[in-house]
Image: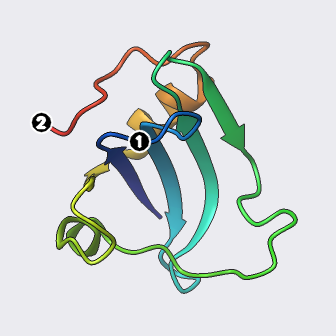
Amino acid sequence: MEYLQVFWADAPQGEPAVIFYEVDTADDRLGRRSIDVFADGRMVRYEDMYDGAIEITPLPTAAELNSNIWGEEFHAREITAAQFESVWSAQRYEGPFQAQ
């Protein structure tokens, strides 16, 4: 597994400012779980990222996200499983909202 934290600079209202992904590297980089974090600290957790999805696509690596292929507003970094689980179990997000 790989774990990513993605910062969305100037995310439009109603969109998450930070997104966490649990990526299954043994299954074509498909996402397992994700967490959307909004500017007010509210979080929405997804146990199954593809529930109700029409198309399933692999998740890019942090390096790919940082190469600006998907836009200059996305910045990503790898995090540990423990960091992901800490956010997953939290009631509210208290971490950074911008890449450092």
Relative side of 47 to 31, left or right: right
**Distance CA(mark 2)–CA(mark 1):** 17 Å
At a point 47% along the width and 46% down the height, the residue shown is 20
Please name whichever residue, 84 or 94, is drawn nearer the observer in this view of the structure: 94
Residue farthest toward the right in the current orientation of the protein: 52
Front residue (pair 26, 50) = 50
- Kindly state the secondary structure of the residue where label 1 is placed: loop
Question: For the view shown, which residue lies furthest in the left direction?
Answer: 100
Q: Which residue is mark 1?
A: 11
Does residue 83 appear to the left or right of 33 in the view shown?
left
At label 1, the amino acid type is Ala
Q: Nearer the viewer, residue 74 or 13?
A: 13
- In the displayed structure, would residue 4 be above or below residue 52? above
Looking at the picture, how far across and down is residue 100, in whole percent? 12, 36
Earlier residue among tags 2 and 1: 1
Mark 1: few/some/many CA within 10 Å (<14, 14-19, 20+): some
Which of the 4 image quarters holds residue 66?
bottom left
Left or right, 54 with respect to 86, comes to right
Render colour scheme: rainbow
Which residue is at the front of the view, 9 or 6? 9
Nearest-to-viewer mark from 2 and 1? 1
> According to the image, label 2 marks what residue?
100
Q: Position of residue 36 (x, y in %)?
A: 56, 39
Helix, strand or loop for disc 2: loop
Kindly indicate whether the residue at mark 1 contacts the one at mark 2 (C-beta within 8 angstroms): no
Q: What amino acid is found at the position of numbered circle 2 in the picture? A: Gln
